[in-house]
Image: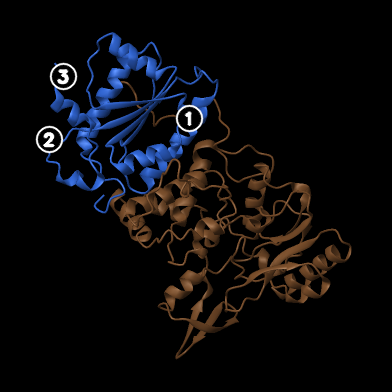
Chain colours: A brown, B blue
């Protein structure tokens, strides 16, 4: 990670000093452990605060949406985030020429802070130390060692798509990154396993997870693809949403959000990590990615490709239609 | 003479939380049908004009095109307590707006798969192609869906006891 940070420093320094961009978006250490915050690097002296590690858990693309067109911005991204930027470029929300992408290959993924607090039984930790694959969490009156694979985000565990597909600058990869390549496992293994369960079990799972939802909209705010000026949930005319804590309302919101992300979600899982209640419905979004691959042979989002729901083929499968007899 | 009792019964939309109280004998499936103006609505009209008999459980909403249907309409219908939803449009290639039904087809398959994935019975949401000349086909589709919905029972979608 230190090597990456060094090469990032060189790239960012050259971008800032040559005035190629107005600022570079990255991460700096936050006030709480494991909670980095976005850093806007405008001057060279800010570069020292830049960090890059496995707990930079926000999707920085979200912060580009606020910026006016024509403003040159540099941004440090992993591949899943680059793909979500590609979606926004395809949807004409961001100009490709405005953005200088600094692509960083991803090693094992991002730590899901909700998994950490689950393993610590909700206790707050004030300190953590990394030692190889072991993470030591310290708090008032306890100390616990947790393995990295237990706290990794779910989609990172099954991710094969780790090298940037679109970039202006690519960070040199240390050797530890290359040995991860493994063709043995199926990317959608967890979805396939989940589909084998009975409908009752699947419903029980989603009910259990979504009952925790408080409709705080943290998932919507963390997602770079949720950029509607007026979300259907906030609309008064017509009012789709009754603003109660009924399970059906939560279902309606999460199902509709999932449909809005069909063919767009890239699996960065910023939404899952942003959830204050620790709801884990990443399978819903992963299912969408599997569906687009199975049904329409659209695997990954590429620059310039039409969106899945905004295009069609004459011979799309239609076995689900009601037959007359 | 208008049978006032009957019209009243038709107009009452049972609130979602009272569905359990409806006894099995009294319960009639209520199906909302979004029909495209140019084909399926005309097909339904033809079925009526031709005096083809089909179950009276269906309520029709006319929409300009099947591509106008937002999956949210379907989810919301199920949430407020309709027992089944039918969306029907022109056959592929016959869309009045050239490609609306192709886009609709993709949206529907996403919704269909997603509802099945979270464990909701197949058959609550139905999609069909019915042209303006297919009055009999429309009646058949309605008969089939009503029969299926009867088997599935009252709508408990998104409810605790799904």
Residue neighbourhood size for the residue with mark 3, other residues' Cα within 10 Å, grouped as few (<14), some (14–19), many (≥20): few
**Viewer-nearest residue: B56 or A103:** B56
Quadrant of the drawing holding the N terminus of chain A: bottom right
**Side of A226 where A26 appears, left or right:** right
**Chain letter of disc 3 in the image:** B
Residue denoted by label 2: B26
Determine the image quadrant of residue B115: top left
B59 displayed left or right of A96: left
Toward the right, the furthest residue is A18
Q: Nearer the viewer, mark 2 or mark 3?
A: 3
Q: Is residue A155 visible?
A: no
Give the structural element (helix, strand or loop) at label 1: helix
Foreground label between 3 and 1 = 3
Query: Which SS class for mark 2?
Result: loop
* Residues beneath discs 1 and 2 located on the same chain: yes
Task: Give the labeled residue for mark 3.
Answer: B2
Judging from the image, mark 1 belongs to the subunit labelled B
The residue drawn where x is 33% and y is 44% is: B79
Q: Residue at x 51, y 86 (%)?
A: A138
**Farthest bottom residue?**
A141
Q: Which residue is mark 1?
A: B68
Camera-side residue: B5 or A198?
A: B5
Q: Earlier in the sequence, mark 2 or mark 3?
A: 3
């Amino acid at each position: 990670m230190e090597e990456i940070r060094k090469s990032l420093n060189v790239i960012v320094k050259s971008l800032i000093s040559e005035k190629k961009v107005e600022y570079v978006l990255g991460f700096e250490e936050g006030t709480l452990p494991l909670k980095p915050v976005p850093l806007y690097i405008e001057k060279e002296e800010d570069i020292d605060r830049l960090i890059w590690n496995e707990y930079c858990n926000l999707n920085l693309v979200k912060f580009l949406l606020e910026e006016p067109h024509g403003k040159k911005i540099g941004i440090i991204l992993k591949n899943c985030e680059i793909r979500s930027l590609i979606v926004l470029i395809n949807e004409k929300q961001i100009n490709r020429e405005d953005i200088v992408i600094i692509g960083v290959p991803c090693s094992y993924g991002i730590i899901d802070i909700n998994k950490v607090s689950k393993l610590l039984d909700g206790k707050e930790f004030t300190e953590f130390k990394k030692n190889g694959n072991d993470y030591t969490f310290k708090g008032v009156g306890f100390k616990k060692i947790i393995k990295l694979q237990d706290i990794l985000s779910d989609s990172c565990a099954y991710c094969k798509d780790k090298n940037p597909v679109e970039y202006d600058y690519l960070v040199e990869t240390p050797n530890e990154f290359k040995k991860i390549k493994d063709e043995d496992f199926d990317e959608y293994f967890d979805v396939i396993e989940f589909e084998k369960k009975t409908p009752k079990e699947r419903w029980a799972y989603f009910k259990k997870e979504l009952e925790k939802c408080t409709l705080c909209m943290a998932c919507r705010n963390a997602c770079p693809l949720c950029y509607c000026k007026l979300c259907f949930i906030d609309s008064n005319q017509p009012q789709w949403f009754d603003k109660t804590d009924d399970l059906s309302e939560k279902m309606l919101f999460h199902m509709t959000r999932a449909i809005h992300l069909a063919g767009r979600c890239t699996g960065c899982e910023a939404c899952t990590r942003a959830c204050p209640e620790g709801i884990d419905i990443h399978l819903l979004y992963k299912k969408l990615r599997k569906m687009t691959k199975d049904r329409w042979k659209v695997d990954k989002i590429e620059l310039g490709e039409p969106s899945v729901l905004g295009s069609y083929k004459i011979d799309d499968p239609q076995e689900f239609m009601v037959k007359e007899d | 003479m208008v049978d006032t009792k009957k019209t009243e019964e038709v107009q009452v939309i049972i609130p979602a939380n009272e569905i359990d109280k409806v006894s099995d004998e009294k319960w009639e499936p209520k199906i909302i049908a979004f029909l495209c103006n140019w084909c399926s609505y005309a097909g339904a009209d033809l079925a009526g004009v031709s005096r083809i008999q089909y179950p009276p459980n269906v309520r029709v909403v006319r929409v300009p095109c099947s591509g106008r249907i937002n999956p949210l309409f379907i989810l919301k219908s199920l949430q407020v307590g309709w027992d089944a939803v039918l969306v029907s449009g022109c056959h592929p290639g016959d869309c009045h707006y050239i490609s609306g039904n192709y886009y609709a087809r993709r949206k529907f398959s996403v919704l269909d798969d997603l509802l099945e994935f979270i464990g909701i019975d197949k058959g609550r949401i139905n999609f069909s192609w019915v042209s303006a000349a297919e009055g009999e086909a429309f009646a058949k589709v309605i008969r089939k869906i009503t029969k299926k919905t009867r088997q599935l029972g009252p709508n408990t979608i998104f409810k605790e006891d799904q």
